[in-house]
Amino acid sequence: MSTLFQLSFLFLCLALLAFGQAPKKRFEYKLSFKGPHLVQRDNTVPFWEYFGDALAGDEGIRITPSLRSKKGSVWSKNKLEGSGWMIEAGVRITGRGRIGADGMAIWFTEGRGNQHDDPSTNVVFGAPDKWNGIGIFLDSFDNDGQHNNPYIMGVVNNGQVSYDHQSDGSNQHIGGCLRDFRNKPYPVRVMIEYYNQMLTVRVNNGLTNNANEFEICFTATNVILPTSGYIGISAATGGLADDHDALYLLTHTLHDPSAQTAQISEAEREKFEQEFKQYQEELDRAKQQYQQEHPNDRMDHYDEDDSEWFQGQNEKELRQIFDGQNMIHQVLREMGRKVDELVGRQEMVISRLNSMPVGQQGGGQPPQVASQPSGQINLQGTIQRHEVDRVMNNQNSLLQQLGELK
């Protein structure tokens, strides 16, 4: 087995080990929203503010209605602090025509892009077109006439560059994928994960209600983002118009799995236990009061014939078979997701090798290696073309094997 193939195999093993160390997730409720009963009596959404033509409802937030030249947004009141995070948004974009406009964006930016009252401010999907952070764009309209829309892409900005509307940001995005996200029977889900300066965007195409059916849209490495910022969703319409709805947004911060979890003190533990006991007593008193005021109502809805709650042997065996097959399906889906990520990384390695400068080819023959003293290695030579070809062949072989595993 050649040394280059061993190095390629070692790279694959290291990648598998890296994927095995999943980061710890912590749910951030102040940076999330989800219906039902989303809007309060004063038409506000807890921990969030909406601007422009956005309107909050019981099941979600309509960012823009299907009227021409509308724009709106919703932004978190609190900042997301941390170098690793995961955002999952459920959106619905619907319209009467075959073509819609303009699109929707999911933001993580250093400042809130809610300047809608100044008509001189240039906007991109309902937010200012200069931002410090990243925007994940769901672009519905084909401005450049290249027939490459609807399109999902990510654009990183440092706050100094304006978005290029005429080319649909084709020279500015760090990755993207063609996905038809309009007029789907179920909400389209977008999952954005940022960890160790690596950005991964996954998409559920809205053809199934399974919350775990995601496919990778794109992956980008060496992505530098602010360590703190606001989360937002914005949308805009133009000459054509769609309804842009944000049904939910869930935020998790990601932490190093090897980090020690902070332990609470004994005084805090006793305080939490006392609060729990107090709430439990209040709940018991409320149940007793309700039973006294409504003696004809049955409090325990499970107070029925016991025979209705026991399964027969056949039902029990069918349940076990179903649970086993469901577990196998989940394992296979997780393996497919990891293989997709590995394939994405392998393709990035190949693209970088293709653009790597090489030394003189020497007529296609392997170069002569000068003899070195024992224990020394000559590291001054440049990589030769035949060595690049061997690495690429090994990478292609690994890609083919990974494809067969899928």
Image: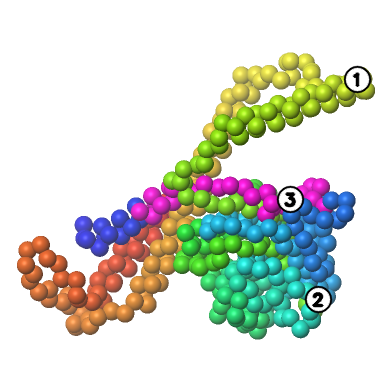
Of the residues tagged 3 and 2, which is closer to the observer? 2
Q: Is residue 16 magenta?
A: yes
Q: Position of residue 41 (x, y in %)?
A: 88, 51
Residue span colored magenta: 14-39
Q: Residues within 10 Å of mark 2 (few under 14, many from 20)?
A: few
Q: CA distance from mark 1 to mark 3?
A: 35 Å
Q: Is residue 279 left or right of residue 177?
A: right
Where does label 3 land, which residue? 34
Q: Which of these two is toward me, 200 or 389? A: 200
Q: Position of residue 181 (x, y in %)?
A: 68, 63
Q: Tell which circle, 1 or 2, labels the residue nearer the N-terminal end.
A: 2
Q: Is residue 187 magenta?
A: no
Q: Tell which circle, 1 or 3, labels the residue nearer the N-terminal end.
A: 3
Where does label 1 land, which residue? 292
Q: Is residue 303 left or right of residue 203?
A: right
Q: Position of residue 12 (x, y in %)?
A: 35, 56
Q: Quadrant of the N terminus?
A: bottom left
Where does label 2 land, which residue? 117
